[in-house]
Image (cartoon, rainbow, N blue to C red):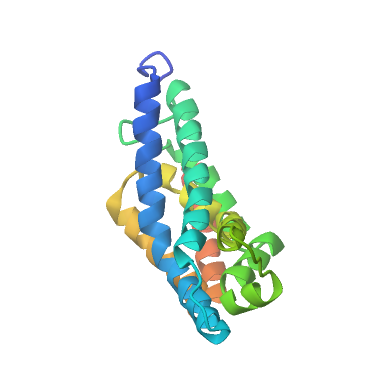
Amino acid sequence: MSTTAGDAVPWGAGQFATVASMWIVMMVAMMLPTVAPWVAALSTIGRRMGRGLPAGEFVAGYLLVWSGFSVAAASVQWGLHEAGWLSAASSLGPQAAGGLLIVAGVYQWTPAKQACLKHCRSPLGFFLTSWRSGRWGPARMGLRHGAFCVACCWALMALSFVAGVMNLIWMALVALFVLVDHAVARGPWLGRAAGAALAVWGVGLVAS
């Protein structure tokens, strides 16, 4: 059951900082495995060029984007909390959760999702067509890749408000799904199938 606006205890700056930090830790833990093939591709290019490339700067740029997403997600959580829409476990009520599931499910079928997923599955193609040289080149590429990755996965991450923010089992399932979606040959079709299942689940919740 969701709390009412009158029951919600207002957050202070300290509470917001704590929640934002939790989101950052959650996103880093979930998304680091998906960037491993990109680091490997960058290392391969570096060997072919005969010099080492700072993969750490690429990863830092990538995680900076996800950190920005985390702050935005914490802001949304703050707003939902203040409005009394979240339960004690930081989950939405059935109708709102159902609506979010429908949005996430439909998004898996959209051209935007498929375009971003195509990018996320092609590290060598990205580096060959979007290479940035110079001192900050790897970090800039990490920022660009992170932006594509957020655009690909934001709806799945938003489903934390369905199961409850910081639900470890849900986090593990979403992280596994994202990894399969990005790495397995039939990942895109599995993603569409999962999207259909999410939408059906959402319709069931809304209708309940």
Does residue 59 sit above or below 40 in this rendering? above
Left or right, 34 with respect to 167, comes to right
Work out whether residue 194 can be spotted.
yes
At which x and y percent is residue 100? 53, 45
Front-lying residue, 190 or 134: 134
- Name, please, the residue furthest toward the top: 6
Q: Could you say which quadrant of the image residue 113 lies in?
A: bottom right
* Count of numbered tags: 0
Instruction: Give the x, y percent position of residue 197.
Output: 50, 62
Q: Nearer the viewer, residue 112 or 130?
A: 130
Foreground pick, 26 / 112: 26
- Identified at 59% across, 57% down, the residue is 136
Residue visible at 52% across and 43% down in the picture: 68
- On screen, residue 2 above or below 109: above
Where is residue 49, by image quadrant?
bottom right
Q: Nearer the viewer, residue 88 or 168?
A: 168
- Quadrant holding the N terminus: top left
Is residue 95 among the parts visible in the rendering?
no
The percent position of residue 22, horizontal first and vertical second, equals 34, 41
Q: Is residue 32 above or below residue 21?
A: below
